[in-house]
Image (cartoon, coloured by chain):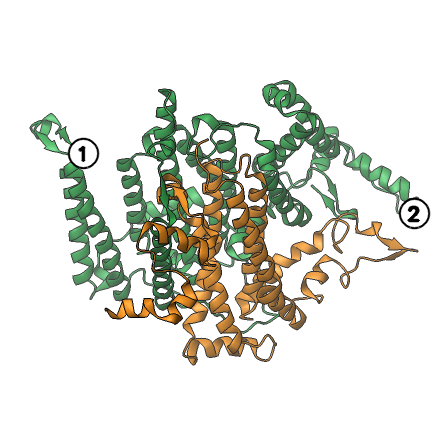
Amino acid sequence: MSVGDYIRESQIWKSVFRHPAPYDRRNRVVVMLTNFFLHLHPVSIKQNGIALSYTWCMGGITFFLFLAETITGVLLMFYYRPTLEWAFNDILALRDVSTLGIMREIHRWGAHAMVITVWLHMYRVFLTGSYKPPREFNWVIGVILLKFTLLLSFTGYLLPWDQLAIWAITVGSNMARATPVLGSEGPGFQLLNVGGYDLITTASDARFLLLGSKFVGEETLNRFYILHCVAIPLAVAGLIAIHFWRVRKDGGISQPL
Amino acid sequence: MHHPNLTSSVIFGLGFLYLVQLVMNFFWTIRSLKNDGHCRLPSLFGGAEVPVAMWWGLYTAVLAMLTIAHFTGYSSPDSFLIVLPDWFKGLVDVAVSDPKWFFTETVLVFGAIILLRRQLATDTAGWILLNASTVFLSLSLTDWDFRQIVGKPDNVPIVGMLFIVGFFTWLSFKKANENDSRLEQGLGPLEGEDNEKVLVWPDLVYTELIVMIGLTAFLFFWGVCLEAPLEEPASSVKTPNPSKAPWYFLGLQEMLVYYDPWLAGVVFPSTILGGMMALPYIDFNKKGNGYYTFNERKFAISVFLFGFLPLWVGMIVLGTFLRGPNWNMFGIYEYWDVHKLEALNNVNLSEYFWLYGLGVSMPVPDANGSFMSQVGTIVWRESPGIVLTLGYLFLLPSVMAMTIFRNFAFRMGFFRFMVFANLVLLMAALPAKMVLRWLFNLKYLVAIPEYFINI
């Protein structure tokens, strides 16, 4: 008996996988049904639907990058403290001292790559008309996921707390000041006032909500850190689950009718 | 300060870039020998029948010489001859350093993609385009200013994105062309042929595994080769010039040149997202579901590509590579001079109307008057722009419904058509304002700075 067979015959292996290795047709079906990670997939699939020249694999790559970002991000969280005193120095240490400092490179480049792949996924889905009935709603979820991907990247941009970070976020968040009605320099902000006192000021407008402050400061860093590491990833994970579920429920990868 | 265009390490590094192109074209020549058949030489050269691959072989030989030259000639960069000529740099700089030329060019590229899709989306044309862009990139890298802007760590992914978007646009049109030819002959799309069911294990899970391993390796490789950027510690008093948003928002930042923040930063981004979500409910065309095609969805694909290529990707390129200090435009080979002056003398529509058109002074709201009288005067002052804007958003859809989009309006119903027409008009609002700015130096159609309502 080979070592491989010995392992596959052991009680431990069987308790984990509950069936023999997927060498024959029956077990290749069974593995898809009994494995939690594989059960996202159907058992069988139209072969043209999984051709790389058709799907470009961009949705899958985006999901993989999300996982890679999660793993590298969690590792980075062990090193990084989101305070004015430490944020920049911790990134410096990641660059110059820490053994796993390359995690920051992977995290940053993976983030750029994810923005691009999510666009390309949308591009492919559009060009193959895959948003058409019955998949309309999954396209809507996809657009929300696209927005969250950009927001994830945007909130992460601030965390190194260098010049590149705060000024990019300053430029980006200055827009919020001009939100109609809710921004202190937006059209119609005077509408919200009580007895002649404006409710919308620089200390209470949409930009303040985003930054937690009148300018990009420590409160902003904390706010963006929590959005970046907890709030948005949770929302994205939930939406991804729905997105994948709907791919299956809407008839799998799109095909000519 | 003088910066040398070439240094030893740049020349040596470019050697690797040419080596990659050499290897690529070596294999392409072999492929061409098998697939491309023969062509006749011009009679000047004897008119002999030669394989098409000969041309690729010659090109590959030139690349080989370039590679050798770079790997051996790096010791004296001052006398190295393979550089971009200055007249070419000047020409390119003029062509891209003005937003109106740049935008016109991206629109022309978009038009060429649509109109010449049969010619461009072939293997040979695609390969020629790829080589043209890699040679352009390699030669451009001999320029100091070009390296400064393209070599910024966060800009490297954008260069990659351009190649990737180009490739997938090419690929989708190639597949659409195949399907369109088949559909003309009454056959079904290629995606429906030989479409047997296969087991997900192993056919899909192994692809996924290989992609995951490949991507992990790629991310590590990228992370080792290129360090993530880290500038000076944040300082709220030292404002960098230019201050740029993250690269994927630079298209939105570019809109700020033409529209005020409440439109460019809030209304238009929300409309883009809302419009994208509304897309499946607007597109009533049932054809082209689940396969690549262009002819069956000409309008939808053209509008989407116009939004994605010139307006989104094109504006990101403009914002990233061409916008320099003081948000001035710079050519890709041009030094980012902080003192470059550009005359900005933009005029509001109301000023055109009252001052230049009627030759009278502008109506001025009475500072001591009642609120209503002030608003009334302002509305009167801005009435030409208000009428134009309201007409654009409310009258034009009806005109569209009665003329060019009659068929659409009939099939979509009132509400759906109004949403569709307004989304198209809002998308067209950016190029429309651009053209007005370039032709008439128009600042605002409606200028009500008193209430932050500038359009």
Residue B310: percent from the left, percent from the top? 48, 40
Circle 1 sits in a helix, a strand or a loop, which is it?
loop
Q: Nearer the viewer, residue B159 or A104?
A: A104
Whether pointer 1 and pointer 2 mark residues with C-beta atoms closer than 8 Å, the reply is: no
> Residue visible at 59% across and 61% down?
A234
User: Amino acid type of disc 2?
Assistant: Asn
Identify the subunit bearing mark 2: B
> What is the distance, in whole Å, between disc 1 and disc 2 at their CAs?
82 Å
Residue assigned mark 2: B368
Residue B355 horizontal/vertical position (percent): 73, 34
Image mark 1: chain:
B
User: As drawn, is B251 to the left or to the right of A22?
Assistant: right
Q: Which of pointers 1 and 2 indicates the residue nearer the eye?
A: 1
Number of residues whose C-alpha sits closer than 10 Å to that of mark 2, classed few (under 14), some (14–19) or many (20 or more) = few
Choose top left, top right, bottom left or bottom right for residue B369.
top right
At 40% across and 43% down in the image, what residue appears?
Answer: A45
Position of B165 with respect to B364 (left or right) is left
Q: Position of residue A144 (x, y in %)?
A: 59, 49
Chain letter for the green colouring in the rendering = B
Seen from the viewer's position, the closer of residues B433 and A31 is: A31
- Chain identifier matching the orange colour in the rendered picture: A
Instruction: Identify the residue position indicated by label 1 in the image.
Output: B36
